[in-house]
Every structure is written in structure tokens, then in C-alpha cells.
Image (tube, rainbow, N blue to C red):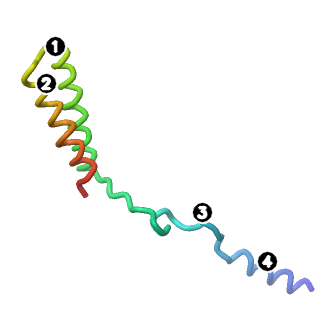
């Protein structure tokens, strides 16, 4: 009887855990892989800087450079930072 109990415990300890928490994030069905690299962070950072400087210049009264920087930040740099792989 002692041998069978030891065998059961040994067998149970090797069994992998069950459920969704046992699988890594990439192996889960339907979970997209995150492809966020250093270049994405650079584009997002440049977009945030362009937006910040654009709002600062807008507060100072710039009617030419501020809108250009805001459009560049919102419509070009941030989308590139999100979409680029």
C-alpha cells in the first residue's frame, strides 16, 4: 500500500497544471503577440515631444509652427509608433 501511494504522488507531481493560467501568454489561442520594439518607443516619444512643443507654441501664440507640430505628432508619429512592426 505504501508503494502505490508513493507512485500516485510521484505521478501527480509530474502532471502539468491545467487551465488557462498554465499556458504562456503567446501560446494562448486568440492572444495577439506584442511586437513593440525600441523603434516604436522612439516614434511614440517623438510624437509626444512634438505634441508637447506644439501645445506650448500654441499657448505662446504661434499660428504656423504649432499646428504643424500637432498634426505631425497626432497624425504621423503616433500612428507610425503604434502600427510599425
> In terms of sequence position, does the residue under pointer 2 or pointer 3 come before the other?
3
Please tell me whether residue 69 is drawn above or below residue 78 in the rendered image.
Answer: above
User: Alpha-carbon distance for marks 2 and 1?
Assistant: 9 Å
List the residue tagged with mark 1.
60
Which of these two is toward me, 73 or 21?
A: 73
- Image quarter of the C terminus: bottom left
The mark closer to the camera, 2 or 3, is: 2
Do the residues under discs 2 and 3 have CB atoms within 8 angstroms?
A: no
Q: Is residue 30 left or right of residue 58?
A: right
Q: Residues within 10 Å of mark 3 (few under 14, many from 20)?
A: few
Residue at screen point 21% across, 23% down = 55
List the residue tagged with mark 4.
9
Q: Is residue 65 left or right of residue 38?
A: left
The mark closer to the camera, 4 or 3, is: 3
List the residue tagged with mark 3.
21
Q: Position of residue 10 (x, y in %)?
A: 75, 79
Please tell me whether residue 60 is drawn above or below residue 51 in the rendered image.
Answer: above
> In terms of sequence position, does the residue under pointer 1 or pointer 4 come before the other?
4
SS for tag 3?
A: helix
The mark closer to the camera, 3 or 1, is: 1
User: Alpha-carbon distance for marks 1 and 4?
Assistant: 73 Å
Q: Residues within 10 Å of mark 4 (few under 14, many from 20)?
A: few
Q: Position of residue 69 (x, y in %)?
A: 14, 31
Residue at screen point 86% across, 81% down = 5
Residue at screen point 50% across, 67% down = 28
List the residue tagged with mark 2.
66
> In terms of sequence position, does the residue under pointer 2 or pointer 1 come before the other?
1
Which of these two is toward me, 1 or 34?
A: 34
Do the residues under discs 2 and 4 have CB atoms within 8 angstroms?
A: no
Amino acid at each position: 500500500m505504501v508503494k502505490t501511494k508513493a507512485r500516485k504522488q510521484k505521478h501527480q507531481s509530474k502532471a502539468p497544471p491545467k487551465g488557462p493560467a498554465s499556458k504562456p501568454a503567446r501560446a494562448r489561442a486568440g492572444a495577439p503577440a506584442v511586437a513593440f520594439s525600441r523603434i516604436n518607443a522612439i516614434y511614440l516619444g517623438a510624437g509626444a515631444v512634438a505634441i508637447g512643443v506644439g501645445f506650448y507654441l500654441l499657448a505662446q501664440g504661434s499660428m504656423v509652427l504649432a499646428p504643424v507640430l500637432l498634426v505631425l505628432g497626432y497624425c504621423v508619429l503616433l500612428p507610425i509608433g503604434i502600427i510599425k512592426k
